Amino acid sequence: MINVTKTFLPPFEEYAAILKRAWDKAWITNNGELVQELEQKLKAYLEVPNLLFTGNGTIVLQMALKALNITGEVITTPFSYVATTNAILWEGCQPVFVDINPDTLCIDATKIEAAIIPHTQAILATHVYGIPCDVDAIDAIAKKHNLKVIYDAAHAFGVQYKGKSLLSYGDISTCSFHATKLFHTVEGGCIIANDDAIARQLMLYRQFGHVYDEYFTMGINGKNSEMHAAMGLAVFPYIEAIIEERRHICASYSNALGSKFQLPVCPEDTRFNYAYYPVLFPSESALLKAINELKSHQISGRRYFYPSLNQLPYLQQTAPCPVSEAISRRVFCLPLYPGLKADEINQIIQIVLKYSS
Ligand SMILES: *Cc1c(COP(=O)(O)O)cnc(C)c1O
């Protein structure tokens, strides 16, 4: 079976050797040595001023909204994983969907201003597939209208844009280290704030709002464990090799498919991470036929991202997003992971090519 992704597992002995450090100290959670070491390494690698390792990439979206005091309308993208919208709803806020740019598939910055009303407090946008949002335009709009900016950077680990880490943009950026993501800690995530006071607030939120006997604020359990940090430390030395191998596979796909299929466009001046390989089929029916044929050869991709989030059945209020709705019906992510073999890639290409028109 060829899946859309296959979790990278480091050599077991390397994981075990790191895990043993926690074992020997009998310290397995609560901001232990491995969590702190992982945070230091990630801070340096991602070139960000601060970073908190957390339980997952969803709780950080909720913590971000809370830390920025967002209680009202949040302008957001309909083209993302469902966690982006759920976090807004879970925090009691109102998502306001703004359609996406048909090339980058990120929120269309030229359509944001028309969606701003007096209750709008924030923009929560996703660098979908690791493609940078129009961060400069979003920043300018946010300044003009006094809005906070949160980036769901769950796909953007290691991406650089205009010479800076993509995770350093916005008031807060969040990432996911789930096993299906480019860099993983089994389950996990992180949050990065550009303001020191917000970063401290997030640190308190992560540990129930208190430090020993001093209670500062309402908090939640956003922590992660030494076991998860050990996985991160064991995967970390391989990250450049992982990205390089993915780049290679993507190049093979693009050589064969680039002239036959519409592919999302990454803006110039991006150092990309090759986290996903999305292909836009000419129609949903072509996509469904391709999925069936791939399945019959034990190959599965994912309909990332479908449905368009403005069409979630549990929304009280929503708005049409024709670009996102149309794209989500015909987008498909091809299998992409280190270890995917050349003959497997060729087999996938041969099947997919049949459905280019
Ligand atoms: C995976 C993902 C999340 C959620 O991350 P978890 O670690 O699984 O909670 C949030 N947003 C996007 C865009 C994602 O792809």
Image (cartoon, rainbow, N blue to C red):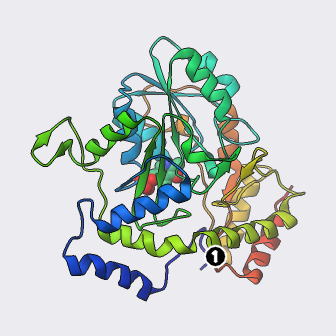
Q: What residue sits 59% from the left and 16% below the top?
A: 144
* 3 relative position to 291: left or right: left
Q: In the rendered image of this protein, does residue 42 appear above or below residue 84?
A: below
Q: What residue sits 78% from the left and 52% below the top?
A: 263
Q: Which residue is mark 1?
A: 338
Q: Amino acid at mark 1?
A: Pro
Q: Residue furthest left?
A: 213
Dot 1: few (<14), some (14–19), or many (≥20) neighbours within 10 Å? some
Residue 89 shows in the view: no
Q: Quadrant of the C terminus?
A: bottom right
Residue 135 shows in the view: yes
- Residue 237 quadrant: bottom right
> Residue 287: x and y, percent?
72, 57
For the residue pair 19 and 315, the one nearer the viewer reads as 19
- Residue 105 quadrant: top right
> Residue 333: x and y, percent?
66, 60
